[in-house]
Amino acid sequence: KILAEISQIPLRLAWAITVHKSQGMSLDVAEMDLSKAFDYGMGYVALSRLRSLEGLRLLGINEMAFRVNDEIGEMDMVFKKLSKEVAAELGQIGTEELKLRHSTFLKGIISKESGIKSADTLKVLYNKFFGKK
């Protein structure tokens, strides 16, 4: 006569979240269904949560998952152009001008940082970050 019986089912802890809730997370493994993506960038947000593609199991996808808002695409082109221009400009700055810009920046943060109150501190910061030769 059996008094008690136990059946055990192997379970693995898991949970579900929305794409929006996943923002800011880094995941090793994820199972995603993007077949119901309804807004620009949802596919990017979801897929970019993963540290590597090896951890991805994609159950479904639709065209909207990979669409990018036209305004965002245009702004991306503007940012790339500006970035190239600034990089070219920075490449032409001489050593003395660069030191002056560093110094000007550090002077600008003196009044904003609570512990920095004197020019001596500026020298310490400058030497710490840019070295004294």
Image (tube, rainbow, N blue to C red):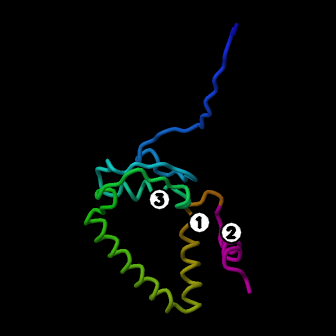
Structural distance between the alpha carbons of marks 2 and 3: 41 Å
Badge 3 is on which residue?
Answer: 48
Badge 1 is on which residue?
Answer: 110
**Residue 60 placement (x, y as % from top left):** 37, 51
In percent of the image, x 44 and y 44: which residue is there? 21
- Which one is in front, 107 or 30? 30
Disc 3 element = loop
In percent of the image, x 51 and y 38: which residue is there? 15
Is disc 1 surrounded by few (<14), some (14 to 19) or many (20+) residues within 10 Å? some
Residue 121 numbered mark, or none: 2
Proximity of marks 2 and 3: CB atoms separated by less than 8 Å? no
Proximity of marks 3 and 1: CB atoms separated by less than 8 Å? no
What type is the residue that disc 2 sits on?
Thr
Structural distance between the alpha carbons of marks 3 and 1: 38 Å
- Which one is in front, 115 or 129? 129
Structural distance between the alpha carbons of marks 2 and 1: 9 Å
What type is the residue that disc 3 sits on?
Ser
What type is the residue that disc 1 sits on?
Ile
Q: Is residue 127 magenta?
A: yes
From the viewer's perspective, is 50 left or right of 79? right
